[in-house]
Amino acid sequence: MSSDYAEKEREFLDTLAADTGRDLDGWMAAIAGTGLTHRDDIIDWLRQRRFTFDRASWLERIHNNGGRPIYADRPDLKTLVAGTSEPPAKVQRPAVASQPSAPPAPVRQAASPSPERSTDALGLEALLAKGKAFRPLAQHLLKAIETAHPGVAASARGALIVLGLPVEFAVLAVSAKDVKLGLAMGDAATRPGLETARITSAPPTVTHMVTLTDVRRIDAALLAYIAEAAARARPPPA
């Protein structure tokens, strides 16, 4: 799901110097020179320099990521990290002695995606698009959950993204204001950052929620809350 945003980040950074007079390193140094540390303060400072909110937010997240592009760990963006948008040169393989030609393998027709999967993917994209500047944050959260819990399935249901293993244990409500993560945690007590769920149209099993506006909230404590909800959703061992 992050490929579209990886490409958008590439385009944003490729044109940054031409559009603003500073490249990424220049803006990272400028932000550091302000002494500002709070997300909103940095975004406001960038907005005063004629950045739109979404681009200011993206630059702030990159600054918080140590000055590295958010998607820099993706193999297809290594050229961006290296400072060039050209594809890597092809490796020349040593010549080998010619062999008798084998008969060509039959060409297999690629399987068409099922209508259900295509519709679901479109539904997820539509829900993520509602996040506008917070869309990358929702993407990061989904990626973190998928990494910590292999096999989790995400699907669109109404205005929510539902996560299951396969029993549903979490929902995401993505908006231009924030990202709300609802968790099915039963009678667990509320804790710092974990409050009683107030998510419209969430299933009754969703009892708690966390409100996120910053990628820094995706930390060990949040992952522990998610793990607790996921553990309740897993079937007991036979």
Image (cartoon, rainbow, N blue to C red):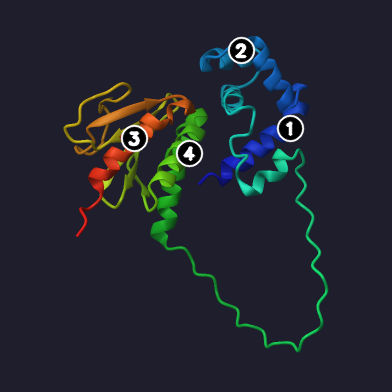
Q: Circle 4 sits on which residue?
A: 139
Q: Circle 1 sits on which residue?
A: 15
Q: CA distance from mark 2 to mark 1?
A: 20 Å
Q: CA distance from mark 3 to mark 4?
A: 19 Å
42 and 228: which one is in front? 228
Q: Amino acid at mark 2?
A: Trp
Dot 1: few (<14), some (14–19), or many (≥20) neighbours within 10 Å? Answer: some
**Mark 3 touches mark 2? (CB < 8 Å):** no
Name the front one of labels 1 and 3: 3
**Mark 1 touches mark 4? (CB < 8 Å):** no
Dot 3: few (<14), some (14–19), or many (≥20) neighbours within 10 Å? Answer: few
Q: Amino acid at mark 3?
A: Ala
Q: Position of residue 101 (x, y in %)?
A: 74, 87
**Relative to residue 158, is residue 21 drawn left or right?**
right
| Residue 126 in view (yes/no) | no
Choose the circle earlier in sequence order: 3 or 4. Answer: 4
Q: Amino acid at mark 1?
A: Thr
Q: Circle 3 sits on which residue?
A: 224
Choose the circle earlier in sequence order: 1 or 3. Answer: 1
State the residue at coordinates (33%, 27%).
210
State the residue at coordinates (57%, 46%).
3
State the residue at coordinates (60%, 45%).
74
